[in-house]
Structure formats: C-alpha cells, structure tokens
Amino acid sequence: MIVAHNAKRMYRFDLMQRLVARLEHEEAVIGGIGNTNFDLWSAGHRAQNFYMLGSMGLAVPIALGVALAQPERKVFAVEGDGSLLMQLGCLATVATLAPKNLAILVMDNGVYQITGGQETPAARADYAAIARGCGLAGAAWAADEADFERLVGQCLATDGPHFIAVKLDDQPPVTQTERDPPQIRDRFMRGMGAKRSKLLG
Amino acid sequence: MDRAWHQIALDVLKANEVRLIPYVPDNVLKPLIAAIHADPFFHAFTVAREEEAVGIVAGAWMAGTRGMVLMQTSGFATLANVLASLPCAFQIPVLLMISERGTMGEFNQGQAAVWRTMRPTLEALAMEYHVVTRLDECEFIMDRTIQQAHLTQLPAALVLSPLLTGGKPTARQVVA
C-alpha cells in the first residue's frame, strides 16, 4: 500500500489533461467548486462536463445522481480535498449504493488554495484510508503520473465504485471557467442525451 | 374510504415519474418512506446529510431521472447555500418534501426554534413552496407543484403541515 506522504506532488492541470485524454466514450465528469473545475475547463470543454458553483462538497453527490440515472455511462467526480472534507458522509453513501460506473478523484493540495492557501484542518488525514473506512475497498493514492494513468485505466476498464486520491503541488489554475450556470446545465444535459432542443447548443 | 396523505403522495410521485428518493428519515414520514421502499417503481435510500440528497437529485435530473428529497424542518435549515447555488442558480427542479416539525404542539425547543427559519429561508430563496394542510387539497397541490417545477425548471418545496399528517404526537412527559 502506498501511504499518502510518499505520493509525489503533481500538477493539477497536467493530471486533468491526462484524465480528459483517456475519455473516449462520452464519460461524464463533474468538477467541484473552484480550482478543480477551473482546470477541468482549461483541459478542454466537453459536452459531458459539469462545472459546479458554490455548493461546496457536492461534486460526489451530483456525480452519484448522474451515475444512478445512467448506469451504462462512466461518471467521474473530481473533487478538492477541502470540499470532500465538508461532505465526507457521501463516501459512505457511495459505498453503500455501490454504483459500478462511478469513480471519485480527490485532488489534495492540503490547502484552500482559492482563498489564499490556508491549510485545511486535515494535516494528519489520509483520504484513501477514509474512503476505505467508508467501504470503498480499492481506494488508493496515485504514487506518480504513471500510477495515476494506471488507476484511471482501472476506473475505465473495471467495475467501481473507484476512488483515487492525488497529492498536488501549489501551482495555480490555468484559467477560470465561464460562469453561466443555466448554459452549463443545458450543455451538460445535451451531453448526457437527457435534453433535445432545436435551439442551437 | 379516503386515501391517507402518504398514499396520495405515493400516487402523485408515480404519476409524475418521480423515482429517485434520497432522504434523511423522519417519524411523520415513516408510512410514506415504508410505502416507497415497498414499491419497486422507486429507488429510495438514506443519505448522511440533506445537502447530499440535493446534489444527487440535481445530478440525476440532469441525466434524465426525476427525484425528490424527503426531510424534516431541521434538515431543511441546513440547505440554504446548496439550494441557492445549485438548483436555484442552475435552474434545476429539485423537489423537496418537508415534514413540518416545530409547531402546533412541539415538545423540542430546538425544533421550535429552527421552525421559525423555514418560511423566511424559502421566501428569501424565492423558491415556490406550498404548505399542505388538508387531505382534500393534497393531491391537487402536490401534483401541480411537481408539474410546475418540471415545466419551469425550478426547485420547489412541499411542506407537510401537522394539520395534514397529525404531526409527531405531543409528549406529555419528557421525551428525548
């Protein structure tokens, strides 16, 4: 088992690009509040991306809802460590419902980067261990970029629910997501095949 | 014989194809929760917090499945931020069914205090909500509220008054 403090600190935007490059079957990706969804956006907009606003901690629950509604589609929740910390109970819910098509990716920089880099109150916490404690048996830290690629491949090829945690360096996001919630929702629904409209998408 | 409020609620949810029911339990909602679990049409499950359920129903709706969150008044009081920034901002018809605690014979001071925040919060969010008090109005209010939420793509709340449900019986002795 790879413990948290041995995991290499990686660049969020690089990991996001690596994730998006592996998505070939219209997999849904839910980006949590702030810098996680900014870098998801920067990695190249897809119709199957949903970029959350203020509901800090809800990337995993939103992804769970999508996964339950469309069991044939793989769904990724990309969540920050501070955000997950606000809604740890959702890991128990995911483990209990055990949707095969859901993967959770936690991006842990240890700080509230968007508000000035204050440390989270989780200096001694191990998110993969927390996930395993909730019942997500395969939860693991990605040791480095190659290990991250291997774990993402596992999410795509095998039944979940899956949980990957990564340690991040302190680089800022590349840019910011366009904030237009109804448009983001509309595009995402079309990307999910849940909405048909003659209005141009 | 008249259908009970929970039978009406079950029938209305089915008629409107509202299938996904994440909830935080409540005593008054017990017969509805039991009936929903007994009916394979529904997928009902508990969540750790009401916020989580709002996220689940929002995600499911965007992917083509309708849902409703069940909770009690105190649970609603935890939701202002996620309601404002998810269903209100994104225009997603997240439906809430709230069992009204804290009024008309409440024995728990905490419930009585938090009850006073519910209507002001719903109004501040500009959320459509209706308080169901009478059995003869129950089907119409529930059915039309659910329909309108989906037609207008906006969240809505149905508050179940003790006048409808009987509420949680007043304790004559000290009850935890």
Image (spheres, coloured by chain):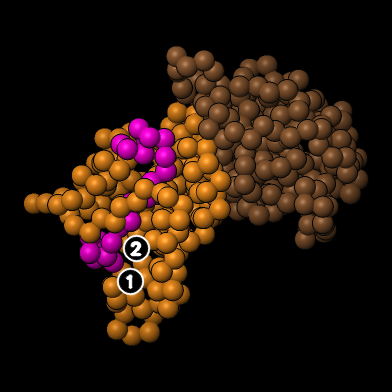
Chain colours: A brown, B orange
Horizontal side, residue B150 vs residue B136: left or right: right
Q: Residues within 10 Å of mark 1 (few under 14, many from 20)?
A: some
Residue depicted at x 49% and y 29%: B63
Front residue (pair A15, A56)? A56
Front residue (pair B117, A157)? B117
**For residue A136, what is the image quadrant?**
top right
Horizontal side, residue A54 vs residue A150: left or right: left
- Find the magenta span and give its range: B147-167
Please state the chain letter of the residue tagged with numbered disc 1 in the rendered image. B
Q: Circle 1 — which element?
A: loop
Give the image location of residue B165, x and y in percent.
Answer: 25, 61
Please state the chain letter of the residue tagged with numbered disc 2 in the rendered image. B
- Marks 2 and 1, how far apart in space? 7 Å
Q: Are marks 2 and 1 in contact (CB under 8 Å)?
A: yes
Residue B104 lies, with reference to residue A37, above or below; the image says: below
Q: Residues within 10 Å of mark 2 (few under 14, many from 20)?
A: many
Residue depicted at x 30% and y 52%: B130
Front residue (pair A151, A167)? A167
Which residue carries the number 2 mark?
B100
Q: Amino acid at mark 2?
A: Glu
Q: Amino acid at mark 1?
A: Thr
Which residue carries the number 1 mark?
B103
Residue depicted at x 77% and y 47%: A114
Residue B17 lies, with reference to residue B117, above or below; the image says: above
Q: Is residue B65 magenta?
A: no
Give the image location of residue A128, x and y in percent.
Answer: 75, 47
